[in-house]
Image (cartoon, rainbow, N blue to C red):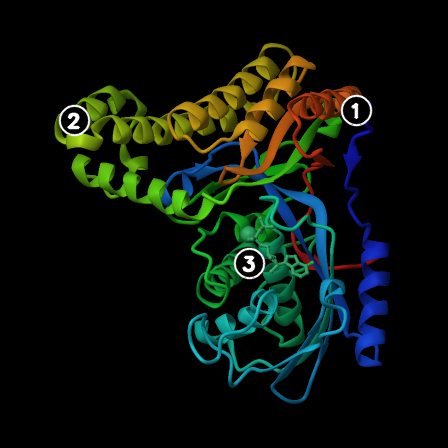
Amino acid sequence: PAVPDFSPALTNEKGIAQATALFHEAFGADPDGVWYAPGRVNIIGEHTDYNGGLALPIALPHRAFLALRRRDDRTVRLISPQTREAVDVLDLDAIGPKGTPGEVPHWAAYIAGVAWALERDGLGPLPGFDAALVSCVPLGAGLSSSAALECATSVALDEIAGLALAGPADAPADAGRARLVTSCVRAENEMAGAPTGGMDQSASLRCRAGHALELDCRDGEAVHVPFDLAAEGLALLVIDTRAKHSLADGQYGARRSACERAAEILGVEFLADIAPERLEEALATLRERGGEEAELLVARARHVVTEIARTVELVSLLSDGSPLAGEKLARVGELMDASHESLRVDYEVTCPELDVAVEAARAAGAHGARMTGGGFGGSAIALVDAGRVDDVARAVVAAYAREGFTPPAFLDAVPSAPAGRATA
Ligand code: ADP
Ligand code: MG
């Protein structure tokens, strides 16, 4: 049987060395420093962000490293190994949002876009800069490689321009980081043209090692919830399905607008305003007034309200101070499984690759497993005993082979530190 393909995280030492070497080669000088930002994975609370609900992401050990040097003019030069030949040269006075003449091509939008957004948000003027990117966050796997680029750029610019918002990685300044989140989201929405919420950037800038981030997506309030998996003898296995179904983009918008229509019928701002004990009543109202799409709205609303309740319960379990074992661990697993079922049946955003991954992981002894991220491909997670990671991964590889799917990739998702300056 095929051996599971694990994507290791780059260590700080290697990240610094590789980004610095690339910088040297491209620009013939030393960078001022190397900054990094992690990708993220969401434990529970899916498709709740745009409904004013809760999410619970962790920062991955997989990071984007950005070697960067301040310039005396307004020029930005960028290089990434994926675009080895092309050093993108941009002018901070000429760039602008996607769809305008100043539109920034491809991945450069996630980096130069942050400088543009910070200036728009009143934190400029900023100097130009040269930057070399080396990232080990898998691209397009639902693990937020895009937010990693933005957030690494934001902490680098924070330091070289003396904004002093982020604070050091070992003593992060949360309020200042929440401001950086706003500009990173703006870069993603307006410069890259991706209509995402703030969960990814909040996770990358505001998480803590050994913790998950309980994020209230309505107001950006965040609480750090203990989630020290290694200390509990557990691991979180990320299964990158390597599948991407072309429906994804339109379906995301369709889910969002169904939730908006349901909220409107119910007379609330967000579906998060429906308390779980009022759910049946709310569903009856949707059945009565939802017209032809009544059953669809019922299913979508039921996912959102029950998913927020599951997130609240999981957070309270993790916060009670007792070991994550026994009945408590079993209940955490049940909540993850129930989240997947709700996303599969009521929200209809899973796909065969995601369903097979979670079924195989559970059958091989995972305490719980679910899809994570938007769905229609991307990644799933499985909570497993630390000593069983390889067995569970092998079981998923075997199930994929039986189904004739492309072999998946795996990551060990140790809850890790937020963005900052990389020190070896
Ligand atoms: P995700 O954030 O889930 O990985 P996205 O589609 O939001 O998926 O972001 C992926 C995009 O981010 C890529 O298409 C590319 O433009 C950019 N990107 C991410 N990492 C890199 C990298 N190391 N080098 C160049 N571009 C990157
Ligand atoms: Mg992204």
Q: Is residue 348 toward the left or the right of residue 156 in the image?
A: left
Residue 12 figure quarter = bottom right
Q: Earlier in the sequence, mark 2 or mark 1?
A: 2
- Residue that sits furthest to the top in the current view: 327
**Residue 223 percent coordinates (x, y):** 51, 40
Amino acid type, mark 3: Arg
Dot 1 corresponds to which residue?
390
Q: Is residue 236 above or below residue 62?
A: above
Q: Is residue 160 above or below residue 245?
A: below
Dot 3 corresponds to which residue?
177
Circle number at residue 89: none
- Residue that sits furthest to the front in the current view: 404
The front one of 20 and 400 is 400
Crowding around mark 1 (Cα neighbors within 10 Å: few <14, some 14 to 19, many 20+) is: some
Q: Residue at x 31, y 24 (%)?
A: 276
Quarter of the N terminus within the rendering: top right
Q: Where in the image, quadrant-wise, is ligand 1 located?
A: bottom right
The verdict on label 3 being within 8 Å of ligand 2 is: no
Q: Is residue 356 toward the left or the right of residue 272 in the image?
A: right
Q: Is residue 398 toward the left or the right of residue 368 in the image?
A: right
**Residue 329 percent coordinates (x, y):** 61, 16
Estimate the spatial distance between the alpha carbons at disc 2 and disc 3, rounded to whole Å.
41 Å
Q: Earlier in the sequence, mark 3 or mark 1?
A: 3
Q: Residue at x 80, y 64 (%)?
A: 19
Amino acid type, mark 2: Thr
